[in-house]
């Protein structure tokens, strides 16, 4: 439950504390504005964090050293190969069912991270421009 869920209750408290309707309405409006500003600040911080993560990946991908630029794709391909090998009946010794499930979770996370990263690269300049206004 977020703070916005408690706004009706806080509004009733403001009505009781401030008998002047205009003052109570102004206080409620200010409370909503402060809540929205907090949410925008949180969104801006999340956007900055995502951009920083995207910059790290871009820097690694642009590296002249092959291992620095390819380690993420190689790791994902290795995990994918382990899953495909298991599907084909070639199980690696010592890898349990839970470990295969974990590998699949990592693959999903990696694909999701790539998709989200690409989306953030495209959307972030628009969001940053809107927040500056």
Image: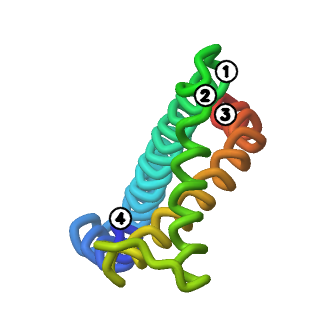
- In this orientation, which residue lies closer to the viewer: 34 or 94? 94
Residue lying at the far top of the rendered structure? 64
Checking the image for residue 110, the label placed there is none
**Quadrant of the drawing holding the N terminus:** bottom left
Residue 62 is labelled as 1
User: Marks 1 and 4, Cα distance to the nearest angstrom?
Assistant: 63 Å
**Which residue occupies the foreground of this view, 63 or 52?**
63
Q: Residue at x 29, y 68 (%)?
A: 14
Q: Is residue 18 left or right of residue 89?
A: left
- The residue depicted at 46 percent of the width and 39 percent of the height is 45
- Secondary structure at numbered mark 2: helix
| Residue in the foreground of this view, choosing between 56 and 33 | 56
Q: Quadrant of residue 113?
A: bottom right
Name the residue beneath numbered marker 4.
20
Residue to which mark 2 is pinned: 69
**Residue depicted at x 45% and y 78%:** 91
Q: Secondary structure at mark 1?
A: loop
């Amino acid at each position: 439950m977020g703070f916005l869920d408690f706004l009706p209750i806080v509004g009733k408290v403001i009505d009781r504390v401030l008998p002047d309707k205009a003052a109570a309405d102004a206080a409620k409006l200010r409370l909503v504005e402060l809540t929205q500003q907090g949410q925008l600040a949180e969104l801006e911080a999340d956007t900055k964090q995502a951009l920083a993560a995207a910059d790290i990946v871009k820097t690694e991908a642009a590296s002249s050293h092959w291992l620095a630029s390819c380690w993420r794709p190689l790791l994902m391909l290795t995990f994918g190969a382990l899953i495909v090998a298991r599907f084909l009946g070639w199980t690696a010794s010592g890898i349990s069912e839970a470990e295969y499930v974990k590998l699949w979770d990592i693959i999903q996370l990696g694909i999701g991270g790539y998709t989200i990263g690409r989306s953030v690269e495209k959307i972030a300049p628009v969001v940053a421009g809107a927040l500056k206004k």
